[in-house]
Every structure is written in C-alpha cells, then in structure tokens.
Image (spheres, helix red, strand yellow):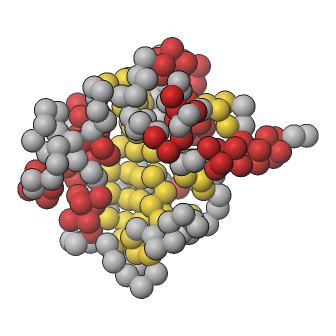
Amino acid sequence: MKALVLAAGLGERMRPLTDTTPKPLLAVGGKPLIAWHLEKLAALGVRDVVINTSWLAAQFPRVLGDGAHWGLRLHYAYEGDTPLETGGGMHNALPLLAGGDDAPFIAVNGDVWCDFDFARLPRDPAGRGHLVLVDNPPQHPHGDFALRKDGTVAADGPEKLTFAGIGVYRPSLLDDWREVVGAAPGADALPPRFKLAPLLRAAMAGSGVTGDHHRGRWTDVGTPQRLAQLDAELKASLQP
C-alpha cells in the first residue's frame, strides 16, 4: 500500500512562522510535524510515500531527503506556485499512487497531529473511501460528516463529527471528478484545482464511504498558538 501526505498548503494562518518554513516542516515534539506521519507509515509497512508540495517546495527534499532515514521511498509531486486543493492534489499525484485494480492508498493531511493507530485503517475498504473522524474541536463545532451505526459515513446527520484528515481512498473516487465539481473555480486549470469534499459527498450518497470514530488525541495545527500548545504537550509527554 502506498501513501500520500498532503503538504502543499500555503499556511496563511500560521504566518509569520510559514513565511520561511512550510507548515508540515514546523517542529513539534522535537521533529517536523510531517515526520510523525512518516514514522507511522513506515511502521505500518508502507514503503512508497508521495508528498505533494507547492509553497517553499524545495525545503521538503532538503529536510526529508529520499526517505531512507525512515526506510521509505519519498516521491515529491510539485503542484506549481498555486496549490491544487485536496482533490486536485490527489488527482495530480495519482500516477505515483495508483497500483492497478483500484488499489487503495492512504492519504494524510500534513498539518494535523493525531495518536490514531494507522494499523486500524482498512487495507481493503468496502467502498471508495474510509475516513477517520474525531470529536469536534472548539474551532469547528459543527463538524463535517455523520457516522451511521452501520459504519458508513453520511454528508449530514444529527451528530456530525470532524474529519481528521486521515483516510484510505480508492483511485475510482476521482473517476467522476469533473462531473461532480462542475464549473468550480480552478476545475478548468491545467492541472485542475478542486476540493475533495464534493467527491466524498457524492460517494456517501451511495453509501460508498465508511469511517471510524477516533476518540484519542488530535490537533489541527492551524494557528501558531495551537502549534505551541501541541509542542509543549509532546515535549512534556516525552520527559522521563
């Protein structure tokens, strides 16, 4: 199984820290945020990891190298000066991810931290995708999607949870992307730029997305304050 780490964002809410460092390379607990993901992917047995890049893209290979430090092979998918959003970034990286027979791959947002055990991710999801959901944080109280009792995920429901930015996807999720996103801004660009959420909602309409509710620790590292808090917590937990 291969994996994609989404790392192309501009990190605008993290400025001035991201003026000189891409958000996934900011340090928490003594190492780059993205390194926490790479360690977990390597422990799971993943060997090929694609990292999509845009803002300050040259820093990624300079800091992470070819992945040998973790026993990985890193492949960098540069998106240009304008990031392609989550859907466009995934579409752009597909040639490096697809393994035939609609083989699924893992995708992780490079700007989250979570203690979720990647071994819980299904190697062969029942539908087109499988999402990790978490309790709604203060900055996102209304959530994203609803988890049904049968394990499928719905676009709406009485008790929504927040998408953790961790999931497993089949390439076929992107088959009908143009029909789904329509004339959304960026859809006609080369390469196309579009969000992943509309594709997920379309798949959910056919019960094509399953999910897990993770009740452990999760942080969307979206502000310098949350970065500093996470850094302090991780350093404290690592003290003997």
**Percent position (x, y) of residue 126?**
32, 62
Based on the displayed image, in which of its 4 quarters is residue 145 positioned? bottom left
Residue 224 horizontal side relative to residue 103, left or right? right
Placement of the N terminus among the 4 image quadrants:
top left
Residue at image coords 29%, 58%: 197
Residue at image coords 41%, 36%: 10
Residue at image coords 49%, 57%: 164
Residue 66 horizontal side relative to residue 27, left or right? left
Residue 67 horizontal side relative to residue 101, left or right? right
Placement of the C terminus among the 4 image quadrants:
top right
**Percent position (x, y) of residue 144?**
40, 68
Q: How many marks?
A: 0
Residue at image coords 35%, 43%: 105
Vertical side of 159 occupied by 145: above or below: above
Residue furthest right in the image: 240
Please tell me which residue lies in front, 204 or 170: 204
Vertical side of 114 occupied by 111: above or below: above
**Percent position (x, y) of residue 211?**
42, 65
Please tell me which residue lies in front, 139 or 177: 139
Based on the displayed image, in which of its 4 quarters is residue 39 positioned? top right
Residue furthest bottom in the image: 158
Residue furthest front in the image: 16
Residue 212 visible (yes or no): no
